[in-house]
């Protein structure tokens, strides 16, 4: 297990157009976004955003939704960054923080 994997302690899933794309992934705990990091995301203040990071190689794109603890977070930006300890990469996701957007698992269809 690499150093990034040890830090990725939150379990999440993603969906696109109501279909679950990644049923179980590990991400870093959600954290606030600084004013500088939140620049350029139209229609949102940095106070309305969160960020997390996931390992590379997953099918995650802007416009998808990250689901953590039954709460839906629209993914507003995806950026690829190097992970020097392993010469690999990771993805940083900027999320819209819409409090109270809980879902029921029956609202999601699994990808076949």
Image (cartoon, rainbow, N blue to C red):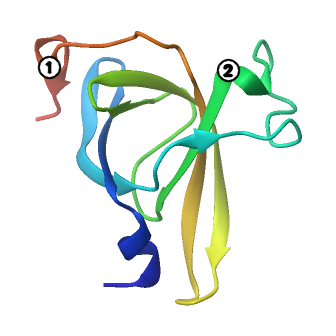
Judge the density around disc 1: few (<14), some (14-19), many (≥20) Cα neighbours within 10 Å: few
Q: Residue 66: give x, y in percent of width and height.
A: 41, 33
Name the residue at 39% across, 11% down: 101
Name the residue at 48% across, 13% down: 99
Name the residue at 31% across, 13% down: 102
Asked if 58 appears above or below 32 in the picture, the reply is below
Kind of element beneath mark 1: helix
Name the residue at 42% across, 64% down: 57
**For marks 2 and 1 on the same chain, the one whose residue lies earlier in the sequence:** 2
Kindly report the distance in space between the C-alpha atoms of the residues bearing marks 2 and 1.
Answer: 25 Å
Q: Residue 93: give x, y in percent of width and height.
A: 58, 44
State which quadrant residue 23 falls in: top left
- Residue under label 1, please give it: 105
- Residue under label 2, please give it: 48
Q: From the viewer's side, name the closer residue of 52 and 23.
A: 52
Describe residue 75's horizontal placement relative to residue 45 as left or right: left
Describe residue 33's horizontal placement relative to residue 65 as left or right: right
Q: Residue 51: give x, y in percent of width and height.
A: 60, 42
Q: Residue 36: give x, y in percent of width and height.
A: 89, 41
In the picture, the quarter occupied by the C terminus is top left
């Amino acid at each position: 297990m690499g150093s990034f994997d040890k830090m990725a302690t939150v379990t999440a899933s993603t969906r696109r157009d109501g279909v679950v794309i990644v049923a179980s992934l590990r991400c870093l705990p959600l954290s606030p976004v600084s004013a500088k990091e939140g620049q350029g995301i139209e229609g949102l203040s940095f106070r309305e955003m969160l960020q997390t990071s996931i390992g590379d190689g997953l099918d995650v794109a802007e416009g998808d939704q990250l689901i953590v603890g039954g709460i839906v977070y629209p993914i507003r930006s995806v950026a690829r960054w190097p992970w020097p300890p392993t010469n690999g990469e990771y993805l940083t996701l900027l999320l819209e923080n819409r409090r109270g957007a809980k879902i029921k698992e029956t609202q999601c269809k699994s990808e076949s």
